[in-house]
Amino acid sequence: MPPRLLAARFLALLVPAALMAGALGSQYLGGLYPCEMCHWQRWPHYAAIVLAGLAFVVRGTGPVRALVLLAGLAILASGAIGAFHAGVEYHWWQGITACTTTAAAGGGSADAILARIMEAPIVRCDAPQWTLFGISLAGFNALFSLAGALAIFTLLFAKAPR
């Protein structure tokens, strides 16, 4: 298998896995609750992890290349959603979703479920919970996802030096 394809396959798994580790870590360790658009950014990463993982299992350059390409497209999709979400947070444009809460339906009586819903924090899609150097988590996802997808596509399609 060509070294560039091996590198692309590795990146196609590393980029979404690292970004999901950061997202889940900020949620479960850092106490940052994801809004609806944050969840939208996660789904393509989940798909990319599965696709890139399959690229480590299948045999043959063609199937590996196809799976890595699909994983790269999923990473690109997450980056595009992240860029849109960051624009909503910076108030460059309106979002297309209402604010969400983090209450889980779970089980229990109707009163217990209602109490969990009422106690759950409201998470606004247009207000970042955390920033670093003025860049929100959605912005960082956009930057890293778009750069990762570009690197994967470059490795897949650029002609090798002679």
Image (cartoon, helix red, strand yellow):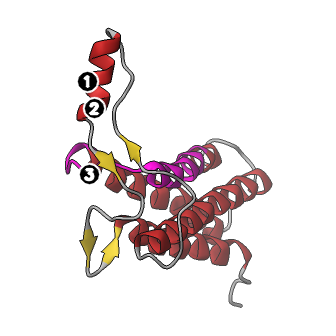
Residue placed farthest to the bottom in the image?
A: 162
Q: Nearer the viewer, mark 3 or mark 1?
A: 1
Residue at left 25%, top 23%?
115
In the rendered image of this protein, does residue 122 appear above or below residue 115?
A: below
Within 10 Å of disc 3 (Cα), the crowding (few <14, some 14-19, many 20+) is some
Q: Amino acid at mark 2?
A: Met
What whole-number distance in Å separates the C-alpha atoms at marks 2 and 1?
5 Å
The circle drawn on residue 115 is 1
- Residue 158 in percent (x, y) is at 71, 82
Q: Are marks 2 and 1 in contact (CB under 8 Å)?
A: yes
**Mark closest to the chain's N terminus, 2 or 3:** 3
71 part of magenta stretch? no
Q: Position of residue 7 (x, y in %)?
A: 56, 67
**Residue 119, quarter of picture:** top left
Residues at marks 3 and 1 touching, judged by CB atoms closer than 8 Å: no
* Circle 2 SS class: helix
Disc 2 packing (10 Å; few <14; some 14–19; many ≥20): few
- According to the picture, the residue beneath numbered tag 3 turns out to be 32
Could you give the CA–CA distance between mark 2 and mark 3, rounded to whole angstroms? 18 Å
Give the label, 2 or 3, closer to the camera. 2
Most foreground residue, 103 or 8: 103
Would residue 121 appear left or right of 88 to someone viewing this image? left
> How would you rate the neighbour count of disc 1 (Cα within 10 Å): few for under 14, some for 14-19, many for 20 or more?
few
The residue at the point 53 percent across, 46 percent down is: 46
Residue in view at x 72 percent, y 45 percent: 59
Camera-side residue of 127 and 39: 127
Magenta-tinted stretch: 28-50
Q: Which residue is mark 2?
A: 118
